[in-house]
């Protein structure tokens, strides 16, 4: 599947300054994830881990994945640790494969 790109040619992530600003916002109390400006709980923590992430250890996860049109905007991002982000990605890929298979079967019927 071809990655979408924006004017920067970076898959919609923005430049380094944009990415840094997103991370800082996710750490802030204003983002609503319980951050204190330095650390924030992994957004998947409710059922996955009890981890706190910092600017350096945070993965910015899109709630609606990019392959479904999700963008890196404040209403579609959350802070996650590496492990949870990786697990979520694998789960989404499995779900998408199952949906594609169901669609193929419907079309073939």
Image: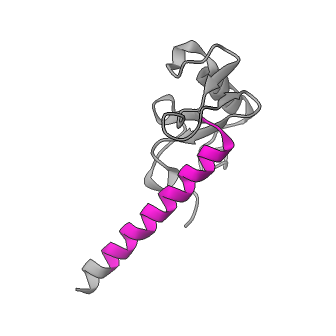
Give the farthest residue toward the bottom: 108
User: Residue 94 placed where, x, y %?
Assistant: 48, 64
Query: Residue at position x 59%, y 37% from top?
Result: 49
Question: Which quarter of the rendering shows the C terminus?
Answer: bottom left
Is residue 4 toward the left or the right of residue 76 in the image? right
Residue 99 can be seen in this image: yes
Residue 4 can be seen in this image: no
Magenta extent: 80-104
Residue 81 painted magenta: yes
Give the farthest residue toward the right: 56
User: Residue 31 placed where, x, y %?
Assistant: 53, 20
User: Residue 17 placed where, x, y %?
Assistant: 72, 29
Provide the major secondary structure of the magenta segment: helix
Q: Nearer the viewer, residue 61 or 1?
A: 61
Image position of 1 with respect to 56: above or below: below
Q: Nearer the viewer, residue 72 or 4?
A: 72
Query: Residue at position x 55%, y 38% from top?
Result: 72
Image position of 15 with respect to 64: above or below: above
């Amino acid at each position: 599947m071809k990655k979408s790109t924006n004017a920067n040619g970076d898959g919609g992530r923005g430049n380094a300054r944009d990415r840094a600003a997103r991370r800082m916002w996710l750490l802030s109390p204003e983002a609503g994830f319980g951050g204190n400006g330095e650390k924030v709980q992994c957004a998947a923590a409710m059922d996955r881990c009890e981890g706190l992430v910092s600017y350096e250890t945070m993965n910015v996860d899109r709630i609606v994945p990019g392959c479904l049109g999700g963008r890196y905007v404040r209403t579609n991002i959350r802070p996650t640790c590496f492990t949870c982000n990786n697990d979520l990605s694998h789960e989404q890929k499995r779900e998408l494969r199952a949906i594609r298979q169901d669609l193929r079967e419907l079309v073939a019927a």
